[in-house]
Amino acid sequence: MSKTVADLKIGEKGTIKEVCLNDIPLKLVEMGCMPGKEITLKQIAPLNDPLYITVNGSHLAIRKDIAKLIQIDTPENKQQNLCETVKS
């Protein structure tokens, strides 16, 4: 199962793996929300929406539904994938 920005916990980091450019606002792409960039969840609003993130040196607030469209790799996902590869 793929992990998305919406799945991050406060302070957790991930690397953007995949972004559907047709589904996210152009402003996010312009601010560096592209594959390979590190993303950090800084804060979650009291009603769990929006999420406050840092990506490419920019601090952004994004809606949770948009965060669900940004797939990421986290250090634990990379470790899990490595273990699965070794078992094969």
Image (cartoon, rainbow, N blue to C red):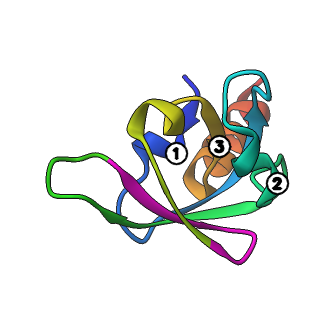
Q: The disc labelled 1 sits on which kind of residue?
A: Val
Name the element at disc 3: strand
Is residue 21 shown above or below 80? above
- The residue type indicated by label 2 comes to Glu
Name which residue lies at 72% across and 49% down. 27
- Name the one closer to the observer, 80 or 38: 38
Give how far across and how far down residue 23 sits, in percent.
Answer: 68, 23
Determine whether label 1 and label 3 are within 8 Å by CB.
yes
Kindly state the secondary structure of the residue where label 2 is placed. helix
Measure the alpha-carbon separation of dots 2 and 3: 18 Å
Q: Residues within 10 Å of mark 1 (few under 14, many from 20)?
A: many
**x and y, in percent, of residue 85 in the image:** 78, 32
Residue 54 screen position, x and y as percent: 58, 69
Q: Which mark is residue 5?
A: 1
Q: Nearer the viewer, mark 1 or mark 2?
A: 2
Q: Which badge, 1 or 2, is on the more N-terminal residue? A: 1
Precedes in sequence: disc 1 or disc 3: 1
**Label 2, on which residue?**
30
Dot 2 or dot 3: first in sequence order is 2
Image: magenta residue range? 50-58
- Where residue 72 is drawn, which disc sits there? 3
